[in-house]
Amino acid sequence: MQKLVLLFCSFLAVNALYSQGFQVNFQGQKQQGMGLAGTALSEDASALFYNPGGVAFVKKSEINAGFSPIFANTLFVDSASGEGYRTKSPMGTPFSVYALFGFKKLESLKLGLAVYTPFGSTIQYEDAWIGRFALTKLSLKSVYIQPTVSYKINEHFGFGAGFIISTGAVDLQKDIPVQSADGTYGHAELTGKALGFGYNLGLTAKINEHFSLGLTYRSKVEMKVKEGDAKFTVPESLSANFPSGPFTSSLPLPSVLTLGASYDTGKKWQFVLDINYVGWKAYDTLAFDYESNTASLADTKSARRYKNILAFRGGANFKATEMIAVRLGGGYGFSPVQSGYVTPESPDGNRIYGTAGLGFKFNEHFNLDLSFYYTYIKRTDRNLESNLSGTFTTIAISPGIGLSYKW
Amino acid sequence: MKQILSSIWIPIVIGIGTLTLSSCKPKYKTPETSAGEINTTRFVMIGGSHTAGYMDDALYYDGQQYSIANMLSMQLQKVGAGAFNQPYMPTGSVGVSGSGMSRFKLGYKTDCLGVTSLSPVRLASSGDVAALGANVYTAGQPFGNFGIPGMTVTAVNVSSYGMANPFFGRMNSSASTSVLTDATASDPTCFALFLGIEDMLPYVQSGAKNGSMTNTAVFSMAYEQIVLLLTSNGAKGVVSLIPDITEMPYFTTIPYNGLNLTPDKVTALNGIYNPIGISFQEGPNGFLIQDPGAGAFNTRKMVAGELVLLSTPLDSVKCNSMGSLFPFRNEFVLTLPELAAIRSQIAEYNAVITTIAQNYNLALAKPNELINKLQTGIVYNGITLSAKFVSGGAFSLDGIHFNPRGNAIITNEFIRVLNAKYNAKIPAVNAVNYPSVTFP
C-alpha cells in the first residue's frame, strides 16, 4: 500500500544567480570620466586592467587606488496586479588598486600587480515582494588579483599579459513556499566561496603621436563553488525534506574582447572609443548540486541562455588648465539577457549611460581623479521559469574617487 | 586658480546632489485601472461552497475572508465598487462543515502500523453548530456573497430555502425568502455566478452512490431563470464553467494500483482469488473492488483511470486488508462507467452555461482549464502550484475546495474574462500574498 506520502517536489526550483547587469567597469577613474573607455590609453597604471599591452608605455612607476560606490535602485511593477516593489540593496563597493614598477636598466619591461572587482553586486528586494520565491537577495563578490608583465617591443608596439586569480563569495537567498502556522515562510540561504583562474592579454599600437589602438582579451573565469553551505529554514514538520548541507555550483565570469582607439590633439583634447565584445554565452545554465537530495530538494538546473553582446563606449578629456582636466563620456550596451530569461537577480536590459569626471594634477607625483556615472535601465519581460512578469526599472549612480602617486 | 576651481566645482556639486536626490529611485506610477463597460456600484456573487470561502471542509472566518467572492469584490473596489458584506462566522470559530464537523488543520496522525506522519486532522471534536443556527443578517447591509455551501442551481430560486439549508438560514433576510430574492433585492449592477458544482458534488463524493446529478434540462431552465432576473436591469456579469471535479485531490491522491504486495501476500491472495479468475503479482496491483457488473462474485481489480476516494479508511487498507482480501465498497471508488457519466454530465452543464453566456452577452470564466493545468502544475511567480494533495499548494485540506492562494488564482480567471469581455482594466490579485496550507 502506498502511503499518503506528502511529496514536496519542486518547492525549490532554485532560480538564481548574478549576471550581466553586474559587469562592473569601474577600474580607472580617468576612464570612468570618459564613458568607461580607454583601452588604447597608456598613461597610468589602470592600463593593467584596461590593456596590459599599454602598460609598457606608462612612463613612471605608480601606485593608484580608486573607489566607486554604486547606489542602485530597482523598481519592479507586476504586470498582473500593478503592484510595485523596490530593492533595498546596500551600496556596491567596487575598487581597484594598481601597482606598477619600471626598471632603469630595462626600460622596455614593466611589472605590475592589479587588484580589482570586475564583477559583483548585491541586490536585495523589499520584504514580502511578489518575487520572494524566486529571489530575496543575491550578493556576488569577486576580486581579481592580476600579476602582470608588459614589454615594449619597439616604439610602436607593446604587449602585456596578466594571470588572473579570482576569489569570490556568493550569498543567495529566497523564500520557500511552505508556510508555518504563524504565517512565516521557509527560507533558503546558499553561501559559498568561489575560486577561478584566467588571464588578461593586451596589445597596444602607437600608430603616431596622436593616434593609438589597443586590443585586449580578458579570458572567461569559471568561478567554482566547491563547498557551498545551503541552509534551509522550514516548518519543523518539513525539516527532513530540506536537509541543510553542502552544495556545489559554478558560474562563469565572461570573456571580454575589446578594441579601443584614442586620438590626442597634442594640446587640449583627447578622445577615446572602445568596443567590447562580451562572451556572455558562457552563462547558459545555472546549476546547484546539493549533497543530500530529497523529494523536495532536487538538484536544479536553470536555463540562463545569455548571448554574447557588444557594448560601445566613448568619451573625451579636456585639459582646462595644466592642473585640471574635465571629462565627459557615455555608452550603450546591449543586454545579454534574452527575452524570457530576465530574473530578479539581474533585472537587465539594454543600457545607456553617461559619465563625467575631473582630474587634478597637483604635482609631478600626485593626482586626484573624480568621476560620476549614471545609468537607467528598463526591461519588461515574463520569465519562462518563474512566470514573474512585469517591468524592472533600475537607476544606478556612482560617484568615484581615485588617487595616484607616481615616481 | 581658486576661482577656476570654484567655478567648476559649484555646478558639479549641485548637479550631482540634485541627481542623487531626485533621480536615484525610479518613480512608481499606479497602472491605469478601469471598470470598462461594467457598472461596478453593486456587486453580488452567487455560487456554492467554492464561492462561500468554504475550505478545509468547513465554513470559517479566515476562509470567508479569502473567498473568491470577497477577492473579486476587493479588486472591483479598485474600479469603483462599493462595500461588500459577507455572512461571517465568528472570528475564533472552529468552523462548521455540512455535517457539523470542525475544520481541518495539518497535524500529526499515527496510523495502525505505528507510523506518525503529517495528515489533516479536525481542529475540534465537533463543529461550530451554534454559529450555523444564528442569523447574521442586518437590515440595510445586504450581503454580496451568496455562496451557499450545498446550493444547487435548482435551489437558488426556491422560497424558504433557509429552512432546507442552514448555510442560507444563517444569512437570509426572512424565513420565507429565496437566495435569488435576497441577492437581487439590492439591485446589483454586476454579478458573478459560480454555480453547478453542487449539482453533482454530493453524488460524486459518495462514489456515485448517493443521490443523483441535476437533470440537464432542469439545470438549464433554473440557470437561465437566474441570469434572466439578474440581467433584467441591465447588469453585466460573468458566469463560470464547471471544472472536472474528479481532477481534484480528493479523487486523485490514492492511486488505483496502490496495493503493493510482497511475495507472501501474493501467494495468500492468489490462493483465495485464483479460483474466480483474479490473480495478483508482486509489487503494485489494482485494489479489489465490489462491482455488481463483474461476474458471479461481483468483485474485480481496479483498472487504470479509475479513482479511489480520499474518504477511504486507510487504516483498514493498511491493517485489515481492505481493498485486497475485503474489496472496496462502491462508496470509495469511481469506476470507468461512473466517471464517463460524470464527465459527460459536466460537459452538458458547461454547454448550457456557454450558451447562456452567449445569449445574454456575459463573460465566461473557465476555471476548468486552470484545474486541468494544475494536474501537471503551473508556475506562478516562482511558486509551483498543482492539484497534488497538501503539497500542491492550491487546494485546502479537504481536497475539494481551494485554499486562499488557489482561490486567488481562480479569482484572477474571473478578472481575466471580465477585462476581456467588458474592455475593463481590473487589476489581478497578487496570489503570493495569500496563504496556502500551513505546516506545524
Image (tube, coloured by chain):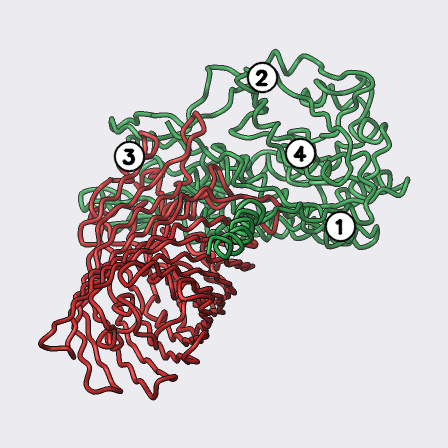
Tag 3 and tag 2 share a subunit: no
In this rendering, which labeled residue sits more in front, label 1 or label 4?
Answer: 1
The spot of residue A404 in percent (x, y) is 28, 59
| Along the line of sight, the residue nearer the viewer: B343 or B225 | B225
Task: From the image, state whether disc 1 or disc 3 is nearer to you.
Answer: 1
Find the distance from the CA under tag 1 to the CA under tag 2: 35 Å
3 and 2 marks in contact (CB < 8 Å): no
Q: Amino acid at mark 2?
A: Thr
- Residue occupied by mark 4: B48
> Of label 1 and label 2, which has the lower sequence position?
2
**Residue drawn 51% across and 23% down?**
B103
Q: Is residue B195 visible?
A: no
Q: Are marks 3 and 4 in contact (CB under 8 Å)?
A: no
Identify by letter the chain in green. B
Dot 1: element: loop
Q: Amino acid at mark 3?
A: Ser
| Same-chain status of marks 1 and 2 | yes
Label 3 – label 2 distance at C-alpha: 31 Å
In three-dimensional space, the C-alpha distance between marks 3 and 4, rounded to whole angstroms, equals 37 Å
Which residue, as the protein is rendered here, is positioned at the far front?
B1
**Element assignment for label 2:** loop
Task: Depth check: give the residue in front, A5 or A156.
Answer: A156
Residue name at image x 40 percent, y 29 percent: A180
The kind of residue tagged 1 is Ala
The amino acid type, in three-letter code, at marker 4 is Gly
- Classify 10 Å Cα crowding around label 4: few (below 14), some (14-19), many (20 and above): many
Could you say which disc has been placed on residue B424 in the image?
Answer: 1
Q: Is residue A51 above or below residue B286?
A: below
